[in-house]
Image (cartoon, rainbow, N blue to C red):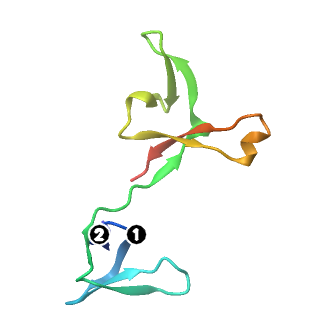
Amino acid sequence: MSQWVRHKSGEGNKWELDAHGQSTHVWRVKALEKDYLFLYLPKSEYEPCEAPVIWEDVTDQCALGGTQEGALGIWHAGVNVIHHRITYRFRKVSGSSLAICGLKWAFVVERKKS
């Protein structure tokens, strides 16, 4: 399991420690930019944190259907996602591609990957 650090203020990116993750005064982290392999962050300013949550778009795998109670449900892999808010979320999106259909916004169904 990977370890992560972030700025003590809670702002900014979370950084994943690399294989040589720490020394006395710095965290060695994997760089976000492709130009660098790793960066050093001062331990005085960064602290361990939880890994970032990663969500995947599963909208195209969902279907509308009824429930036993007669309500409308949104189903993914046999699960009514409306009742599983820890594992699934809805994200409202807008964009120029929606305007072609005459829509101003739509909802995307995302499942927690990690």
Q: Residues within 10 Å of mark 2 (few under 14, many from 20)?
A: few
Nearest the viewer among 86 and 11 is: 11
Q: Quadrant of the N terminus?
A: bottom left
Nearest the viewer among 1 and 56 is: 56
User: Which of the numbered marks, if any, corresponds to residue 104?
Assistant: none
Q: Residue at x 38, y 60 (%)?
A: 52
Q: Which residue has dot 1 on it?
A: 12
Q: Residue at x 47, y 9 (%)?
A: 70
Q: Which residue extends farthest left?
A: 24
Residue 58 versus residue 4 in the image, above or below: above
Q: Residue at x 50, y 87 (%)?
A: 36
Q: Which residue has dot 2 on it?
A: 9
Mark 2 secondary-structure assignment: loop
Q: Residues within 10 Å of mark 1 (few under 14, many from 20)?
A: few
Give the CA separation, mark 2 to mark 1: 8 Å
Residue 96 rendering spot, x and y as whole percentages: 74, 47
